[in-house]
Amino acid sequence: MWRGWLGSGGFWGGGWRVGFRRDLAVLRRRDVRVFVSARFVSILGSTIAPVALVFAVLDVSDSASAVGIVLAARSIPNIVFMLIGGVIADRLPRHLVLVVANTVSGLTQGLAAALVLSGHATIWQLAAIEAVNGTAAAFVMPAMTGILPSIVDRAELPQANAIAGFARSAAMIGGGAVAGVIVGLTGPGIGLAVDGLSFLIGAFLLSRLTIPRIARTAGSVLTDLREGWSEFVSRQWVWVIVLAFGLLNLIFTACYQTLGPVIADRTFGRAGWGLVSACFGAGLVTSGVLMLRLRPRRPLRIGMLGMLLTVPVLLALALYPKTPVMAVSAFLLGVGFGIFGISWETALGQQVPIDKLSRVASYDMLGSFIAGPLGQLTVGYLAAAISAKAVELYGAGLFVLITVITLVVPSVWNLRRLDA
């Protein structure tokens, strides 16, 4: 079984250093370096933003429900415009779509920072700004999925995804650490300003990409959506994973992203939550190094097993919300998320035609995130009714059940990497 997961060769074998250098050879491509740099800068700021935004809301209104409203204001338009984002990303040069979306996000986050720093921010203003950001993000995510498959060979895709994941993880470590310092010492307004600047730098870097033109047939938006849907439903492993993540993301957004900072604010503090975010990033970095060398033959198998590492952080929030325990569990969370993310991006990039990839990715993201706002909007009321501890414990149990059910689906368990 381990050979099936890890691929040929041992991780600690005598030739691992040579293999590691070979895996990094994809960085010789200029566009890979530019893309990885842009992703690093954007995610560095975006890692600061959730911490800064949540505590900015708590400064205005000390309420978990208010946090949920602002986060849902971003999530709902993100979901509504996701399919259109996939169509646009398959029709237009993907890097230019990213440039426009990043620019919009940078300017709006700058506005949010100005309101917070001036002391005039209100919940409805922050919600409106996040709605614009959510709309822009609906175009970012489908376009981002199609960049690496456009500039590297499919055989190189596992290494390229692992390197991009490593850069993302390193940015999250730096962002988490900076978030703790900024929010804990100077307040959330500076954090939002840094996020806005990072988006603008990312837009500049992305404008330097040269993406090969992809032959596309002319058609209506509805035709494009139907083609994307046909590709999506024709692969059982795709829609099974997406269905599962619709529920898993509901639990995660409610229990960790929304309720987690509220529990932290009342127990181990804002600076501690920043450290937790940094440890999450450290786990992502670790997963990037592992996946760069391991290259599992059955990516979805090890990816879904990695998602079980989410459970410790939910249990820690429920039973022992202290900084050391939260830091360790957040590290495990990052390892699990990184393993799944790299595995999933590799599976999609290898198995789905490049001219339809962004549309399939948009259906993936729509299904995966559609229930998130429900968790964000209701978790505050649910925690008030049955306690935050109970919400976290029920969430952990459901997370295990859904993951195990997904793993027993043969098409998920047995999907092989194409170059294995």
Image: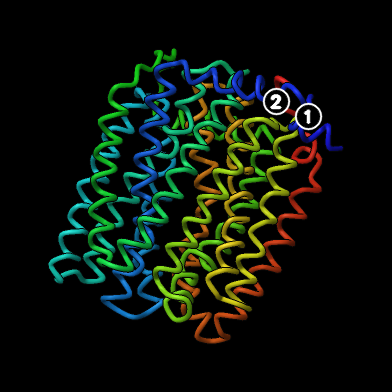
Residue 153 drawn at (x, y percent): 56, 15
Residue at the spot 72% in from the left edge and 33% down from the top edge: 296
Instruction: Using the image as rendered, state which of residue 407 and residue 187 is in the foreground.
Output: 187
Q: Which numbered dot is residue 10?
A: 1
In the rendered structure, which disc, 1 or 2, sits on the residue that comes first in sequence?
1
Query: Residue at image x 28%, y 25%?
Result: 207
The amino acid type, in three-letter code, at marker 1 is Gly
- Displayed quadrant of residue 301: top right
Report the side of 51 relative to 186 (left or right). Answer: right
Q: Between residues 355 and 316, which one lies in front from this camera angle? A: 316
Quarter holding the C terminus is: top right
- Label 2 secondary element: helix
Residue 313 drawn at (x, y percent) = 61, 65
Q: Residue at x 61, y 62 (%)?
A: 329
Residue receiving disc 2: 16
The kind of residue on which mark 2 rests is Trp
Q: Residues within 10 Å of mark 1 (few under 14, many from 20)?
A: few
Snapshot quadrant of residue 122:
bottom left
From where the camera sits, is residue 314 visible? yes
How far is the residue under mark 1 from the one under mark 2? 8 Å
In the image, 26 versus 154, the foreground residue is 26
Q: How many marks?
A: 2
Residue at horizontal 47 percent and vertical 28 percent from the top: 146
Q: Is residue 28 above or below residue 230?
A: above
- Crowd class of label 2 (few under 14; some 14 to 19; many from 20; radius 10 Å): some
Residue 346, compared with residue 51, is above or below; it is above
The numbered disc on residue 382 is: none
